[in-house]
């Protein structure tokens, strides 16, 4: 039974983050779920995540770009649960444009949320994991962090940065039994990709050996594989969840 385990998931009220929360809930984890939007219907999201499971969920509204707020969020998570076994850095945004047209503001914001946000939350969580001599960190990167993508130089740079960050801390923290891995999703059906036209989606599907976009649940299964109790010997890796798009 994992009922005493605790997972902190950033951006966990919708999309891939919510599916990750549902996956850990299914395994009996207590959850700390971060979000940022005022429009979030927490009651509804709580029911969707719990799906009848008797677990504790604590929602904490924090912009991951703010270091002090991240510190308060982690403190609150510890006050409520006494520990954090798993951290999933999932919060992320896109602000796509060709480099020629990309504003400095849009470049900075994507780096701040995706990469600096991952640093901010992880930095505050690891002292507790180090004391516990146990922890799992799963960072959500992207296949474009490996391959690059026209129109996404800010996003690709942030996701490539996450891979470097993940591997570096895997080396730093292995002696404390803290395992750090990244997931690189391909095209997954969520709000983030709902802006793509059917024609674009069809063109994407042609390039995917499995001939379809992935689901948030398929990503969540991979996150649980690396972040769950049974992973005791995989660290510093990037696992593509992309239907074979990038081999
Ligand atoms: P969504 O746009 O559906 O959700 C993004 C999540 O990030 C939301 O929960 C949002 O919170 C949260 N978030 C955004 N900004 C902040 C912030 N400043 N502070 C805290 N939380 C924030 O995206 P997806 O579910 O599709 O993506 C999840 C992750 O997966 C991202 O890191 C994304 O880059 C990555 N990914 C997605 C792919 C895809 O095809 N969908 C492909 C590859 C990677 P709120 O709801 O409160 O706004």
Image (cartoon, helix red, strand yellow):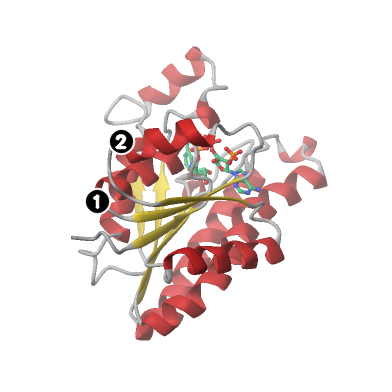
Q: What secondary structure is found at the residue carrying circle 1?
A: loop
Name the disc covering residue 13, or none. none
**On screen, 165 above or below 46?**
below
Which picture quadrant has residue 52? top left
Image x and y of residue 93, in percent: 61, 41
Q: What secondary structure is found at the residue carrying circle 2?
A: loop
Residue at 37 percent across and 61 percent down: it is 6
Which picture quadrant has residue 119? bottom right
Q: Which residue is mark 1?
A: 27
Residue at 42 percent across and 71 percent down: it is 83
Q: Is residue 157 left or right of residue 98?
A: left
Image x and y of residue 175, in percent: 36, 86
Can residue 6 be seen by looking at this rendering?
A: yes
Image x and y of residue 33, in percent: 49, 50
Q: Residues within 10 Å of mark 2 (few under 14, many from 20)?
A: few
Q: Between tags 2 and 1, which lies in front?
A: 2
Ligand 1, seen in the image, is in the quarter at top right
Image x and y of residue 221, in percent: 28, 45
Q: Which residue is mark 2?
A: 51
Can residue 247 be seen by looking at this rendering?
A: no
């Amino acid at each position: 039974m994992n009922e005493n385990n605790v997972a902190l998931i950033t951006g966990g009220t919708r999309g891939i983050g919510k599916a990750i929360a549902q996956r850990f809930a299914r395994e009996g984890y207590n959850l700390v779920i971060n979000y940022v939007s005022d429009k979030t219907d927490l009651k509804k999201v709580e029911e969707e995540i719990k799906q009848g499971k008797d677990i504790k969920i604590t929602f904490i509204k924090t912009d991951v770009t703010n270091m002090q707020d991240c510190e308060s969020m982690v403190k609150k998570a510890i006050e409520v649960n006494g520990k954090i076994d798993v951290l999933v850095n999932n919060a992320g945004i896109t602000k796509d444009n060709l480099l020629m047209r990309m504003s400095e503001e849009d470049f900075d914001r994507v780096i701040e949320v995706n990469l600096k946000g991952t640093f901010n939350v992880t930095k505050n969580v690891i002292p507790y994991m180090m004391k516990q001599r146990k922890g799992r960190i799963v960072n959500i990167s992207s296949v474009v962090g490996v391959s690059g993508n026209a129109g996404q130089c800010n996003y690709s740079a942030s996701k490539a940065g996450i891979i470097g960050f993940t591997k570096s801390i895997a080396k730093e923290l292995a002696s404390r039994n803290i395992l750090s891995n990244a997931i690189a999703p391909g095209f997954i059906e969520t709000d983030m990709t709902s802006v793509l036209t059917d024609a674009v989606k069809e063109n994407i599907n042609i390039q995917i050996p499995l001939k379809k976009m992935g689901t948030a649940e398929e990503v969540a299964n991979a996150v649980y594989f690396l972040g769950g109790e049974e992973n005791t010997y995989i660290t510093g890796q990037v696992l593509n969840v992309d239907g074979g798009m990038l081999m």
